[in-house]
Image: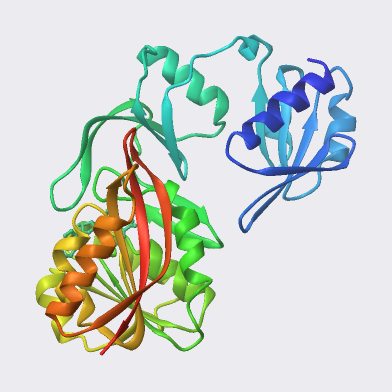
Amino acid sequence: MEQEKLEEKALELFRQQDFRIKEKDEGLYKAVKDDTELEIRILSSEKYSMEEASELIQAGEKVFVDEGLEELKEGVGNDVSVLEEASDREYSMPSYERIGDIVVISELDDVSEDEAVEAVLEHNPGLDSILLKEENLSGEFRVGGYRKLYGDKTETVHREHGVELKVDPTEMFFSEREGTERKRIFTTVDKNDEVLVMFAGAAPFPVTIAKHSKASVTGVEKNPEAVKYAEENIRRNNVADKVQMIQGDVREICPELGKFDHVLMPSPTNALEFLGEALNCVKSGGKLVVYSVSDKEDLYRPVIEKVGEEASREGLKVDVLKRRVVADFSPSKRKVAVEFRVEE
Ligand SMILES: C[S@@+](CC[C@H](N)C(=O)[O-])C[C@H]1O[C@@H](n2cnc3c(N)ncnc32)[C@H](O)[C@@H]1O
């Protein structure tokens, strides 16, 4: 394949995953997303011989070649992906989310299963498996029903903001799409703050906050499987001295925990049912972050009113500090976050 065409194809894969691309040298690029920086070397067999190509490749570079240089896969110690000429054809693409080395397809969008698998593999070299969501997230634990379309693994390690999160979407809730929100939160936590994360799941918020601040974090989660992964994530990211996970119902656990500078409620579908417990865990002058699902025409009013009512019932005063849309929930609904200052 022509060098230019191969570069276009390889770089498109990174652009689709929101990487920013910078050219460094001929055929060498830097791809940056959050805390991830990749060196990408692209080598076409029309331009380089095997010998020239192996001489150019440096340790740590992610390499893309065409079929003519396929043997480099065995010859160099780098991660080498082969892009095929035949894959030039246009694919219809289903809606999907990539979590580590697993892709979860949420909607086939009129694409056949075979076509979906081919299209996803073409755009995501090195995948372990592809899961099709057949039942929506449901129940208290917010877990969906999945069928394997490709590969066998359901467990993977997702990397974002300098942390590694081991998750299994068939056992617990995890969404890659909320990574930006996790970043927003850790940038607002002060050095020695005490933070409570209700509905902590596999601990993406606790681990990310602890990794990027000196704060101490307590996570509470009811799903025992999610807590097992949370414990592993705490160890994996060396934050055991700053994070403790408690398995149980926030309704029973939180009243025993005392008061915190920040209380987060990252469970948009049911957080509003637990406002009493949450408000009573915030130190006077501290912050409560409430997540909710709202109609896109009326994003914040219902949350602000509900928190206001609940605060007066508890004899507390709340002021809105910030509000934002976190992600889409459905065509007409959005996940939103509203931050409140809580005072006695
Ligand atoms: C939408 S998920 C969010 C998980 C995690 N915060 C994340 O961002 O990946 C909501 C989580 O709340 C947990 N949960 C639901 N009701 C709970 C309760 N009463 N007490 C503790 N955890 C609960 C669920 O098991 C689920 O893991």
* Quarter containing the N terminus: top right
> At 26% across and 60% down in the image, what residue appears?
303
Q: Is residue 97 visible?
A: yes
Q: Is residue 71 visible?
A: no
Residue 162: percent from the left, percent from the top? 56, 62
Q: Quadrant of ligand 1?
A: bottom left
> At 37% across and 11% down in the image, what residue appears?
112
Horizontal arrangement in the rendering, residue 59 relative to residue 160 (left or right): right
Q: Quadrant of residue 170?
A: top left
Q: Is residue 232 above or below residue 241?
A: above
Horizontal arrangement in the rendering, residue 305 relative to residue 213 (left or right): left
> At 28% across and 48% down in the image, what residue appears?
294
Q: Quadrant of residue 133?
A: top left
Front-lying residue, 13 or 168: 13
Q: Is residue 309 above or below residue 84?
A: below
* Quarter containing the C terminus: bottom left
Residue 104: percent from the left, percent from the top? 37, 34
**Colouring scheme applied when the structure was drawn:** rainbow
> At 21% across and 61% down in the image, what residue appears?
271
Front-lying residue, 7 or 304: 304
Question: Residue farthest to the left?
Answer: 252
Residue 48: percent from the left, percent from the top? 88, 25
Residue 287: percent from the left, percent from the top? 36, 78
How many numbered marks, from 0 up? 0
